[in-house]
Image (cartoon, grey):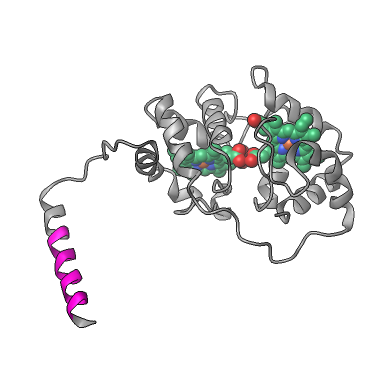
Amino acid sequence: MRAPVIFIGAAAVVVAAAGCSTATPAPKASSPVARGRAYYTTCQGCHGNAGEGFAGMKAPRLAGLPPSYVAEQLLLYRKDLRGGPADFQGVQMNGRAKALPDEQAVQDVAAYIATLPPPPAPVAAAKGGAGTALYESCAACHGARGEGNAELGAPPLAGTDADYLARQLRNFRKGIRGREGDERGQQMAAAAAVLPDEAAIDAVAAHASTLR
Ligand code: HEC
Ligand code: HEC
């Protein structure tokens, strides 16, 4: 087993040495996923190397989201239909989304994100409690197991950080999300308005987050 190890080591040194002599340009890769991977290097500091999210940055999980939804949200940020000064966390995304060179880059990074591993199994299964009953009104669009419904544009909620989900529900209720020009967001704003109170928001978010 030794010889191959030494060989691989030597090969790695050669590659590293070659890498030193040339600057690493943004790869002009041919496939959308390969180009998207290069763009994703500007996202991973907040969203994690595998798109797992980073609660410390309040950046949600992206892995597991369908590319159509990711692209749509990036376009909303680019058009200032999401984020902005009234959205303390979301405002960080406007500049990041606008830094992508064009709409093709938006599609490419969304395609790469779709290759990242989906959420792991929950530590504790969701059952009982106020959240379970409240979630019944959400299941028609987001699916009984929080898997989402691409046709309706309703993203998966399962496995996403509960704090993030609750913040989005509050944003929809305050009109920070679901603005004029964001039709799908407006549908969701109507659904969020039905939740009776603050405790209900937290309970349904906690429940949705533990679904799989
Ligand atoms: C400075 C940290 C930061 C960077 C860098 C960043 N994001 Fe974000 N992103 C956030 C935060 C924080 C949110 C949540 C905003 C909120 O709470 O509404 C977010 C939200 C999102 C959402 C919405 C997710 C959803 O479920 O609706 C998408 C999509 C997204 N980011 C994609 C990206 C992509 C792609 C990049 C790189 C081009 C990127 N982000 C770079 C911090 C960041
Ligand atoms: C009529 C269909 C519909 C119903 C019912 C509905 N939603 Fe949604 N929801 C959507 C759509 C569509 C979106 C995507 C909005 C967008 O594109 O900005 C969404 C987005 C969300 C988001 C943002 C997710 C993210 O990643 O940022 C959360 C959180 C959410 N819904 C929670 C709920 C909860 C909890 C309920 C039940 C109280 C519910 N939804 C009921 C259609 C629905």
Residue 126, horizontal then vertical, whole percent? 79, 59
The quarter of the picture where the C terminus appears is bottom right
Residue appearing at x 53%, y 21% in the figure:
79
Residue appearing at x 48%, y 44% in the figure:
113
Above or below, 111 against 101 in this view is below
The quarter of the picture where the N terminus appears is bottom left
50 sits left or right of 14 in the view? right
Q: Is residue 62 magenta?
A: no
Give the farthest residue toward the bottom. Answer: 2
102 sits left or right of 3 in the view? right
Above or below, 21 against 107 in this view is below
Above or below, 170 against 60 in this view is above
Can the viewer see residue 170? no
Residue 145, horizontal then vertical, whole percent? 75, 49
- When asked about the image quadrant of residue 72, the answer is top right
Q: What span is colored magenta in the figure?
A: 3-15
25 sits left or right of 109 in the view? left
* Closest to the observer, 198 or 74: 74
Can the viewer see residue 102? yes
* Closest to the observer, 27 or 180: 27
